[in-house]
Each structure stands twice: as C-alpha cells, then as structure tokens.
Image (cartoon, rainbow, N blue to C red):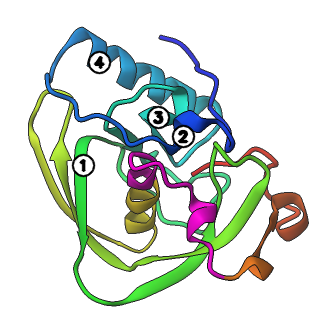
Amino acid sequence: MAIHTILKMGDARLLRSAQAVTAFDTLALHELVRDMQETMDHVNGAGLAAPQIGVDWQVVIFGSGQVNPRYPDAPPIPKTVLVNPTWSALDAQESEDWEGCLSVPGLRGVVPRWQRIRYQGWDVQGNVIDRVAEGFHARVVQHECDHLIGTLYPMRVRDFSRFGYTDVLFPGISAVEDD
C-alpha cells in the first residue's frame, strides 16, 4: 500500500475523461483501491477519484462510516468503492452547499447539486451496486463522479462571492481540503 500525491487543479491530467475498468477482481484494481483508501484516510477525505492520483480509471471511493472532521455537521456515509459509476437525478430539486476538494486545497465554494440521485456501478469484485442517495451522500457521489469526466467543483460554482479560502470562510476547519 502507498500514500499517493494528490494532483492539484492546473494539472492537465485532472481534465481528462477516465477510462472504464474492463476487468474486475484483479490485483491491479485491488491495489489501486487500497492505495486510494490509504491516501484518502491520510488526509481525512470524504472521497477520492482515481484520476486525482494520476490513474486514468473510472474508480471512486467515498465515505468513512463516521463523522468526517472537516465536515462535522454532515452525516456519515458508508464506505463505498464504485467502479464505472453512473448516476441520475431522481427529481428536479437542487441544493446548494459548500464543497472542498483534495485537488483544490485551501479553498471552498458553494456548489449546486441534485438533492436525490440514484447511482449505479460495480464493486471491486464486479458485483452490482445500485443505490439511492440524498443530501450530503448524493453530493459526494456527484463530486467524485465529476472527477471522472474532468470536472472540478470550481467549474460548477455559480456565484464566486461564495468561493474563497477555507481558513477565512471557516476558521475552525483544517486547512487541508477534502472532497
């Protein structure tokens, strides 16, 4: 296992569309997920996408099973590995909330996201995942899936008066960002 360097906004690799995983339950996929989990845990992230560590595969992980110290008011999300994910909004209701990102350290912005979604994909072994999520859980899934299509959350900010440095906006929150 290894803790990887997380690519930062400005690195062209973050703007690419990731490739679908074509083989499940492989040593390479298991190693990637272990490395992603160790990297995410090291920085108390809420989620991480493979492109953020320079791997061009459609793999995201999210959740901690406990309250995240950088999102103390958010409910816990079950730990999930999602391969080749897709998602769709279940209604027309959007919500706006603050987001941060490991690839955009030190900044946060208000981002609109769909309130309720259905997401689908596979786990590492190739078992189907099909879930409905709402609120913070839905926000995290959409944020991580955006990384797979080369989209970073600042690209979704509509009002830049609600975008700034975390230590100025939220003095009690750690300077290292999570997504």
Residue 123, position as x, y percentages in the image = 19, 36
Distance (Cα) linking label 2 and label 4 = 22 Å
Q: Which residue is mark 4?
A: 30
Give the residues in magenta.
144-158
Mark 2 or mark 3, whichever is nearer to me: 2
Q: Which residue is mark 2?
A: 14
Residue 34, position as x, y percentages in the image = 40, 21
Mark 2 or mark 4, whichever is nearer to me: 2
Q: Give the class, few, some or many, for how many residues have Cα within 10 Å of label 4's Cα (few <14, many ≥20).
A: some
User: What's the amino acid at mark 3?
Assistant: Pro
Instruction: Provide the secondary structure element on which disc 3 rests.
Output: helix
Distance (Cα) linking label 1 and label 4 = 17 Å
Q: How many marks?
A: 4
Whether pointer 2 and pointer 3 mark residues with C-beta atoms closer than 8 Å, the reply is: yes
The disc label shown at residue 51, or none: 3
The disc label shown at residue 124, or none: none
Residue 148, position as x, y percentages in the image = 39, 45
Tell me which numbered mark, 1 or 2, is placed earlier along the sequence.
Answer: 2
Note whether 133 is above or below 11 in the view shown. Answer: below
Q: Which residue is mark 1?
A: 85
Tell me which numbered mark, 3 or 1, is placed earlier along the sequence.
Answer: 3
Is residue 72 visible in the rendered image? The answer is no
* Residue 10: quarter of image: top right
Residue 71, position as x, y percentages in the image = 62, 60
